[in-house]
Amino acid sequence: IRDRYVERSMTIDLNGHVLKMTGNSSVLRVKKDGPHPVTLTITDSRPQNPHGSYTGLPAGGVITGGKGTDAGGSIHFVGGAVFLENGTTLKLEGGTLTGNSGSSIYIGGATLVMSGGTITGETVGVHNNVGTFTMTGGRITGCSDRGVYVYNGNMTMSGTAYIGGNGTNQYQYIETADIYVHEPVRKETGLSVTGGIIEGKVYIFFETSDMGSNDNDNEKALKNVAESVVKGNGVLDGHIRVKMDDTPGTAVDYNTVNFIDEVAKTRTFQPIFVKGDKRARKPDDPATVNGQAFMYWAKEGASEEWDFVAEINESITLYAVRTPAS
């Protein structure tokens, strides 16, 4: 690393140790050098290595102490742990990023692929500014303002990825969340959850208003956005809010229902409008799998059948109850 810059593709193995910045910049700044793509890979070959001074964190390597880099405009200092310049890539496979200023990782028109590791104890875990964030594993948790902030970028979650327990700070005018998506240009969200778990709150904000005069049509449009977030085997166990522009009364809030069939290994998702019909729609009965016939849906931790006439006032998970294997 020359002058704190990563200017050629390389792999950094934390090897269970601490990489700490004592200066006033990002710990690592990935910079495109000429026409060649630059990819930084961060791994940790000794994830079991304990650190007495980092009690409460996962064992293994740690990246900490970064002050961030001035991204210009209104963004200012971001990417305390890793600052990705336009056209570069970071592959985060291990280690813990914590105790960095601004945001842990800044994606400035770049690409982050997170398959492992933990981001925790930051103000913002990942700041995606017109970039691409693919999360297939690892954890983002314990970030005080936002776990992930996406500004007109793309984010996909799948596999064993986990985001939860973020947005613990409470402000009067700033929405905190596990994932906050700000869309100043597009009219559909760049967030897609096909696997993994979001355990908390998702906020989607469209800056450009496209609201009509018909409230029913507007609610339907916003609900379509909410329904489009989680697909396939993704789980959103929490709350989702969709808002169009700053027009008063345009924010639409949903509780969430996850239908999980552990035998068939399927998951489906429904947003439930907080101010509308609060009943879940009963899915089609799943087919028999491995000799186990479907019986009914039951709430997590309960054995009795879920009553689909009941109102839902909180986010819940319903599990498929099946007969024993024949």
Image (cartoon, grey):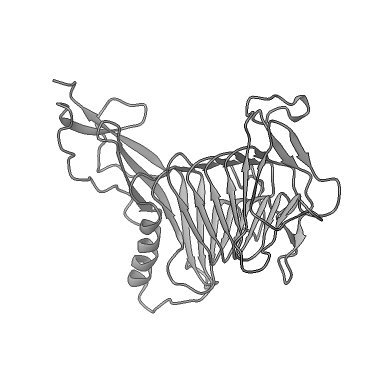
Q: Position of residue 172 (x, y in %)?
A: 66, 57
How far across and how far down the image is residue 190, in percent?
46, 62
Across the whole image, how many numbered discs are drawn on residues?
A: 0
Quarter of the figure with residue 120: top right
Whether residue 1 is visible: yes
- Decide which of 272, 57 is in the foreground and name it: 57
> Where does the image place residue 125, in percent across and percent down from the top left?
63, 49
Say which residue appears at 61% left-offset and 60% top-offset: 88
Work out whether residue 234 or residue 171 is closer to the camera in this orientation and state it: 234
Q: Is residue 82 left or right of residue 24?
A: left
Tell me if 115 is positioned left or right of 212 in this view.
right
The residue positioned 63% from the left and 25% from the top of the image is 48
Residue 59 falls left or right of residue 115: right
- Asked if residue 96 is positioned above or below residue 87 in the image, the reply reads above
Q: Split into 4 quadrants, where in the image is the C terminus? A: top left
Q: Nearer the viewer, residue 91 or 302?
A: 91
Instruction: Say which residue appears at 37% left-offset and 26% top-offset.
Output: 301
- The x and y percentages for residue 245 are 52, 72
Does the rendering let one see residue 253?
no
The residue closer to the viewer here, 35 or 51, is 35
